[in-house]
Image: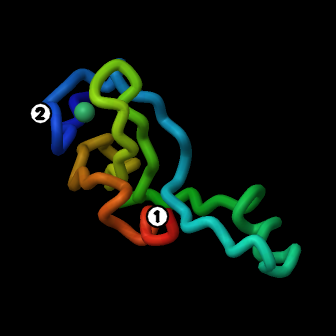
């Protein structure tokens, strides 16, 4: 599988670390149920899923990768800072 880093170009997936589903972290004062859902509950769809990847052996960017879990095709790659994930950073 190859991932097209917006800054480095197409690279082998072994340059990246998978960090899980791309979920927006609850606010610090959020209810425990919101934190429970964020930490423990995961969707497991057959189809497109937004994931968080780190370009560990490249530019060090956090990426939101939309990947089809059925055939592992990469549908979209954007810098996480340009998504809702980076809105609070
Ligand atoms: Zn990169």
Circle 2 sits on which residue? 9
Q: Quadrant of ligand 1?
A: top left
Give how far across and how far down residue 38 sits, in percent: 70, 64
Instruction: Name the outermost residue toward the front.
Output: 89
Residue 84 sits above or below residue 80 on the image:
below
In the rendered structure, the answer to whether residue 1 lies left or right of residue 42 reads: left
For the point 84% across and 76% down, the residue is 33
Q: Which of 5 and 67 is in front in this view?
A: 5
For the point 65% across and 59% down, the residue is 42
For the point 78% across and 68% down, the residue is 35
Give how far across and how far down residue 63 sits, in percent: 35, 47
> In terms of sequence position, does the residue under pointer 2 or pointer 1 come before the other?
2
Circle 1 sits on which residue? 85
Callout 2: few (<14), some (14-19), or many (20+) C-alpha neighbours within 10 Å?
Answer: few
Instruction: Name the outermost residue toward the left.
Output: 9
Instruction: Name the outermost residue toward the right.
Output: 32
Q: Is mark 1 on a helix, strand or loop?
A: helix
Residue 32 sits above or below residue 79 on the image:
below
Callout 1: few (<14), some (14-19), or many (20+) C-alpha neighbours within 10 Å?
Answer: some
For the point 51% across and 69% down, the residue is 88
């Amino acid at each position: 599988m190859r991932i097209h880093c917006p800054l480095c170009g197409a690279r082998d997936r072994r340059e990246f670390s998978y960090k899980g589903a791309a979920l927006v972290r609850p606010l610090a004062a959020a209810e425990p149920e919101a934190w429970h859902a964020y930490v423990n509950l995961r969707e497991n769809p057959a189809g497109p899923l937004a994931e968080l990847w780190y370009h560990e052996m490249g530019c060090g960017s956090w990426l939101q990768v939309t990947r089809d879990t059925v055939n592992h095709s990469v549908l979209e790659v954007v810098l996480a800072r340009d998504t809702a994930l980076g809105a609070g950073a």
